[in-house]
Every structure is written in structure tokens, then in C-alpha cells.
Amino acid sequence: MHNQLDRLIWRRHRRLFLATGGLALLGCFMNTMLSLHSLPNGPVQLVDGNIQKWDVYSSTYFSAFPYWIVAAYWMVGLLMMNQDLKDNFNQFLFTSGFSRQRVYWSKIKVAMLGLLVIAALTLALDYGLTYGIALTMKSAGVGFHLAWPGVLTSVIVGLLSSIGMFSLTWFAALIVGQTGALVVTIVGFTFSLVGSSTISVNILRESGVTLNAEQQTWLMGAGWLVAAIILFVWGAALYNKLSLEHNGEYLLFPKLKVPVYIVFVVYVTSLSVWGTDGWSLVFWFLASAIFGYCWLWRPRLGEMFHQWRSRRG
């Protein structure tokens, strides 16, 4: 039964994995070629001494973990769950005798295995292409020397971050029922993570916890792992309650409106007012509260105005 379910899920989504894998490989190839095209005339080392540190390595000519892999995990998490909700593939599996929990975790297993293959192929292309070009230009003084600390850290933390991104888009696609709103929501939240990570480091520093770059990197990887576990388990609980009743609504689980609203207001306000004055706090709190209410509950303002006038009359 498990193998049969895995095969069904793979046949359903194999085009998504092939397209995503092809895009990741093409993007990595183009990025590597463009980076190495700008090599100066004369001896140059493609990898500098920072590869010896236990930190994610990225330089002008070489990245030890291509960001195209992160993008692939982000994209598959979003599209895989969203497509199944839109095309009623979930209902087909439920009526075929598979339990909801088995379907949910089988999807994650198939996704993780498929994405791991994409990651391995992309890494092989990245390292192999860079090494091959360096080898052909060795006579011109081009060197390519790796070290385990930077490589291991880049791959491990990169994969943890990728899995975290997958869990983020996976969970968002599970609870948001409108594709356009889903894309706007998850893209905005993803970009906001850049600022939130900086704020988190500053909060730790002001609390007396000073971390060097290597410690920050591994803390980030651990944070992504914890977040992924929480979102996967929470998603499994919600998947048990998934129904067609609220299809087409912004949130497929109406009871999440208030928690999502509170998190949105607190998150946006905190992100916007860090390091500013009290007036900014008031402004961003009111702005996020009003926008969040309109976004989640979608009030018909004209209809509400006419009802208010009729009550006064």
C-alpha cells in the first residue's frame, strides 16, 4: 500500500520535479558561467581562505551551495500542495482507501527524496563545472581549492534552510485557499525574513549574547530545522480536518483567522518599528491592524456604509 501510494504521488508530480530540477540546473549553469566569464587576466584563486571557516561560503566566483536549490525547495512546497488542493487530488486519494496521515507524510517523503536528487545534481554541476573550468585554465594560474569546513557547513546549513523554506511554502499552501493571495502572502513573507534575521541577531546582541558569524550560521540552520518540524507536525494535524466546505476562501481553516491576524499584526509591527520611535509604533500597529482585518475578513465597505446609514435613518 505504501509503495502504491508513493507511485501515485510521484506520477502525479513528476513533471513538477522534472521542470523544477531542469530550472535549478539551468540557473546554476548560467550563474556559474557568468561568474567565471569575468575572471581577470592573470593568476586568480576561485576560492579564498574563508572556505576554511565553519560558515556558509559564497564569493564572486564560487558558491558552495547554489541558491537555486533553495528556490527549488521553495517552489515545490508551494506548487505541490496547491495543485492537489485545486485539482481535488487529495479527495481522490482519500476515497481510494488511504488515510489522511499516510497521504500527508507520503507526500512529504516523495517531495524530500525528489528534491534531494535535484540538490545532489545541482551541487555536482556547480562543483564539477567550476573544477573543470579551473582545470582547463590551470596554466593561466587559475586555482580551485576546497576545504571541508566551508563545504560541509554550506551543504548542511543550506539543506536545512531549504527544508525550512519548503515547510514554509508547504504550510502556507495548505491553509490558504486562493492561489493569487497565496503567492502574494508567501512572497512578501519570504522577503521579510531577510530583515527579521538581522533583527533577531541584534536582539541577541542587546541581550548580552554575542555570536560570531559561524555561530550565527549554525543557529540559523537549527532554527530552520525546528521551524520545519513544527510546521510539518502542525500541517499534519490540519490535514486531518481538510474539507471542501471552505474551498475558494482565503483561509481553508476559518478558526485560524484570529491567530493569523494576531501574528500578522505583531510580526509586521515589530519588523517595521525596530530602532524607531513611539509614533512609528502607533502608525505601524494601526496600519497592520487595519490592513490585516481587511485582508482576512474582506469586509464589503460600501455595504457596511449603507447598513450604517439605514440604521441611523
Image (tube, rainbow, N blue to C red):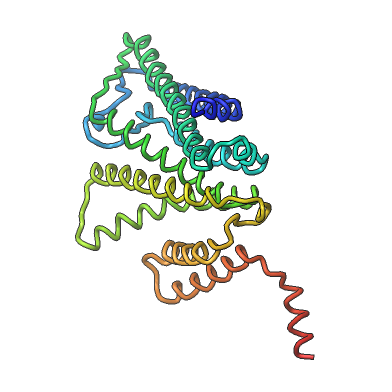
Horizontal side, residue 208 vs residue 132: left or right = left
**Residue drawn at (51%, 44%), measured in percent from left and top?**
170
In this rendering, is residue 59 above or below 166? above
x and y percentages locating residue 30 in the rendered image: 51, 24
**Viewport quadrant of the C terminus:** bottom right
Residue 126 drawn at (x, y percent): 41, 22
User: Which residue ends up furthest to the bottom in the rendered image?
Assistant: 313
Residue pictured at 55% horizontal, 41% vertical: 78
Using residue 35 as the reference point, say whether residue 298 is left or right of it: right
Residue 64 position (above or below residue 253): above
Residue 271 sits above or below residue 231 on the image: below
Is residue 290 found left or right of 120 in the rendered image?
Answer: right
Residue placed most toward the observer, 58 or 6: 6
Name the quadrant containing residue 148.
top left
Q: Nearer the viewer, residue 263 or 197?
A: 263
Task: Tell which of 256 and 312 is nearer to you.
Answer: 256
